[in-house]
Image: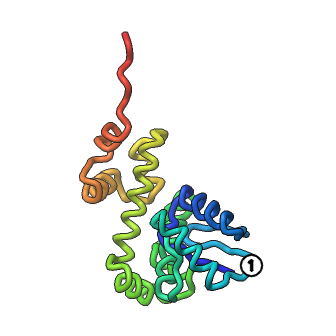
Amino acid sequence: MKLYIKNMVCLCCKRIVRDELEKLGIHPLRMEFGHIDVSEKVTDIKREQIRLALLVFDLELVDDKRSMLIEKIKNVINEFVRSLAEQKKLRFSDYLAQSLHLDYTYLANVFSHVSGVTIEKYLIGQKISRVKELLADNELNMNEIADLLHYTSVSHLSTQFKKITGFTPSHFRTFEYPRLPVSA
């Protein structure tokens, strides 16, 4: 049985979901961002227990088909952003339509209607989140990050980053992760 979880978009969230399910005697077979597979049938009572346990962590068990589709779209976006390094420069709209076997226009319309934001804006937000992670790792320079995430230039990346965060990438790096002064 597959359960869809809204807002389960990071490793910490996956850990929380696994821990909460195990407390309820449910053992996940497979966990992906936004959904889990369990072997046992989940009764209405168990479903309510899961819903309440996850709400504490701002995670939500999703039941209706449109919300499930939104979570699937978000999962594909997250997978796409995380795997950009391995991909050829592929249009995201084609990738999404192929991944979910649905027309991109339909997916974009449902996503915008239900979530209140366009797929493009959500994708940009996820890419900027990935940029923040890469800046925090401090292992790649801006050229490498721009190339990794398929930006046309460092300038394009910097402009988009500043528009979303209010900071330039270099200011974010020093502001978020200041260097410690060296003792004399």
Residue under label 1, please give it: 40
Q: Residue at the spot x=61%, y=64% of the render?
A: 20
- Asked if residue 115 is positioned above or below residue 152 in the image, the reply reads below
Task: Tell which of 132 and 33 is nearer to you.
Answer: 33
Q: Residue at the spot x=52%, y=66% of the render?
A: 8
Instruction: Determine whether, in the image, residue 158 is placed left or right of residue 81.
Output: left
Residue 169 in the image: state x and y as whole percent: 32, 46
On-image quarter of the N terminus:
bottom right
- Asked if residue 10 is positioned above or below residue 49 in the image, the reply reads above
**Residue, far right:** 39
**Is residue 110 at least partly visible in the picture?**
yes
Task: Tell which of 25 and 75 is nearer to you.
Answer: 25
Residue 135 in the image: state x and y as whole percent: 42, 44
- Mark 1: amino acid: Glu
Instruction: Determine whether, in the image, residue 113 is placed left or right of residue 22.
Output: left
Figure disc tally? 1
Q: Residue at the spot x=47%, y=83% of the render?
A: 67
**Residue, far top:** 184
How many other residues sit within 10 Å of disc 1, few (<14), some (14-19) or many (≥20)? few
- Asked if residue 51 is positioned above or below residue 67 in the image, the reply reads above
